[in-house]
Every structure is written in structure tokens, then in C-alpha cells.
Image (cartoon, helix red, strand yellow):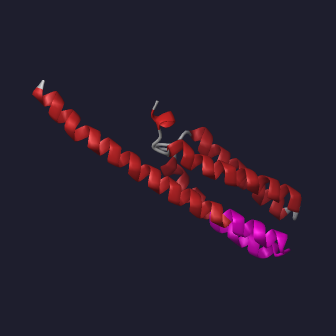
Amino acid sequence: MGKKIVLVAITLPILIIAGFLSMWFTQGLSEEYCQLTRQAEERVQAGDFAAAQQTLTELATKWDKMEPLLQMWICHADTDGVAAHLRGAQAGLMARDTAAFLLESAALTEALEHLHHRDALTWSNLL
């Protein structure tokens, strides 16, 4: 019985700390990627498609590097949603279809914010 109490006393704080670290990491990542998405939107609305393409390429490169790591603790459907909307935004940008790009970038922003909310240490996520 004493070993179980010691095990719980050691494991529980580790799990709580890991949960908070994961939440903060995902929140920072989500905010950074949402900021890049907003920059691309502003550039498209200003008519600077080349700069928007550069920003979106930077976002895609960062996403491609982080996606395998994120899939270790975030539902694949959530990360797949981000990847799908990122591809849609890239397609809209390449076609220079402002409406399609803005529609996909709004969905991309929502999917990125959803990553953070799904990883947040809240009662609804714990239960």
C-alpha cells in the first residue's frame, strides 16, 4: 500500500506538469501560426500575393516540421484538419482567388485555435 501511495505521489505531479507544458506549447504554437495566417490574409487583401505566398510557405514549412510531434498527443483528425485547410489556402492563393483563400484561411485559423482548445487542461478535456 505504501508503494502505491509513493507511486501516485510521484506520478500525479509529473502528469500535471506535463499537461501544463503541453498546453502552453500548443497555445504558443497556435498563436504563432494564427499570426502568420493573419499576415497572409492582410497581404492578400493588400494585393501582395507574392508576400502572402512567402508567409504561407513559411507557415507550411513550420507546420510540416511540427505535425509529427503534435500527432503524438493531439487527435490526428485535428492535425489533419489544419493540414487540409492549409493546402486549401495555398491552392486559393496560387489561383489568386481571394475569396477562396480567405475562406480557407478563416477555416485554418479556426482549426489552429481548436488545437489549443483541445489540448487545454480543462475539466471538459479531462473528463
Q: Residue furthest front?
A: 123
Q: Quadrant of residue 7?
A: top left
Residue 43, x across and y down, in percent? 78, 72
* Residue drawn at (71%, 72%) of the image: 54
Span highlighted in magenta in the image: 37-60
In magenta segment, residue 4 = no
Residue, x 73% and y 68% (percent of image)?
40
Magenta span: predominant SS is: helix
Quarter holding the N terminus is: top left
Q: Is residue 120 left or right of residue 3?
A: right
Is residue 83 shown above or below 31?
above
Q: Is residue 37 left or right of residue 8?
A: right
Q: Looking at the picture, does residue 92 appear above or below residue 4?
A: below
Query: Would residue 116 appear left or right of 101 to someone viewing this image?
Result: left
Q: Quadrant of residue 30?
A: bottom right
Residue 126 at x, y percent in the picture: 45, 34
Residue most toward the left?
2
Q: Residue at x 46, y 50 (%)?
A: 23
Figure disc tally: 0
Front residue of 67/123: it is: 123
The answer to whether residue 117 is above or below residue 102 is above
Q: Is residue 48 magenta?
A: yes
At a point 33% along the width and 42% down the height, the residue shown is 15
Q: Residue furthest top?
A: 1
The percent coordinates of residue 56 (x first, y second) are: 70, 65
